[in-house]
Image: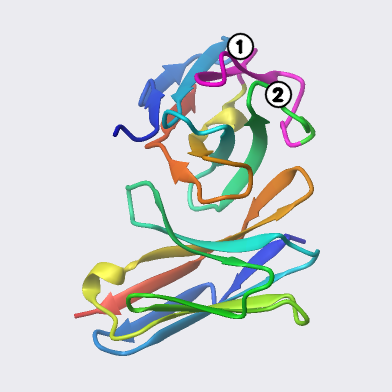
Amino acid sequence: SQQGEEDPQALSIQEGENATMNCSYKTSINNLQWYRQNSGRGLVHLILIRSNEREKHSGRLRVTLDTSKKSSSLLITASRAADTASYFCATDTGNQFYFGTGTSLTVIP
Amino acid sequence: GAGVSQSPSNKVTEKGKDVELRCDPISGHTALYWYRQSLGQGLEFLIYFQGNSAPDKSGLPSDRFSAERTGGSVSTLTIQRTQQEDSAVYLCASSWEWRETQYFGPGTRLLVL
């Protein structure tokens, strides 16, 4: 199975609500990153959290990292229609880099 | 400054032909990454370069795939004897150092007929 897996696979919420998506991984990591991919557009980096950090904020984004459970969560507060996209977590292991299969978020106006 | 650029943006080729995909990273970025994304799928890591060196080539799908980077800058991904299953979007990214924030190019959409 994958090094990084997001959960849920798909999420649909109303504008203004919060969205939470989770990522689990298998091996020890140096850092964990979250990326967003809009339909038909490229990947954009959202936030990087290092293995010695537990929580990080950036605007409406909040990321947590629990290295004991090998999991991370991404919280988007006060969602907007423009947040509709696929969200991926990415981790490194040795000399390779793994992206999960993504969570598809739909924010309904 | 300019972001990561890739060329061509689209490539249609016939099965059995060779193709070469190019990536121009952000100036000064030492690490460069290649990924493949099939329709509706996540990203599949292919290879990364630290400078001109690729420490691990095991992510390349087959021996038909090769990659090189020269001058610590431009990289090319070559697919020989293309097959239909090679059809995908090939993404390149760069970062100032391995494991740091990656900046992605727009990708090359490859279609093998």
Front residue of this view, candidates A61 and B62: A61
As drawn, A94 above or below A5: above
In percent of width and height, residue A29 lies at: 73, 62
Q: Which mark is residue A6?
A: none
Q: Is residue A109 left or right of residue B66?
A: left
Count of number-bearing discs: 2
Locate the N terminus of chain A and report the quarter of the image it occupies. Answer: bottom right
Residue segment shown in magenta: B59-82
Q: Amino acid at mark 2?
A: Ser
Whole-number angstrom distance, CA of label 1 to CA of label 2: 28 Å
- Tell me if residue A88 comes above or below residue A55 in the rendering: above
Eye-nearest disc, 1 or 2: 2
Query: Would residue A99 be found to the left or right of residue A28 on screen?
Result: left
Q: Is residue A94 left or right of residue A101?
A: right
- List the single residue furthest toward the left: A109
Asked whether residue B84 is drawn in magenta, I would say: no
Of A89 and B25, the residue lying toward us: B25
Where does residue A4 sit, x and y in percent of width and height?
A: 67, 63
| Residue located at (38% from left, 20% from top) | B8
- Estimate the x, y position of residue B20 in percent, counting from the top left: 52, 14
Judging depth in this view, the residue of B107 and A54 nearest the camera is A54
Three-letter code, disc 1? Gly
User: In the image, is residue B13 above or below residue A103?
Assistant: above
What residue did someone put label 1 on? B16
Residue B83: image quadrant is: top right
* Residue sitting at x 79%, y 34%: B58
Query: Helix, strand, or loop for circle 2?
Result: loop
Name the subunit of mark 1: B
Q: Position of residue B33 (x, y in %)?
A: 58, 36
Q: Residue at x 53, y 43 (%)?
A: B37
Sequence-wise, the earlier of marks 1 and 2 is: 1
Residue placed under numbered mark 2 in the picture: B53
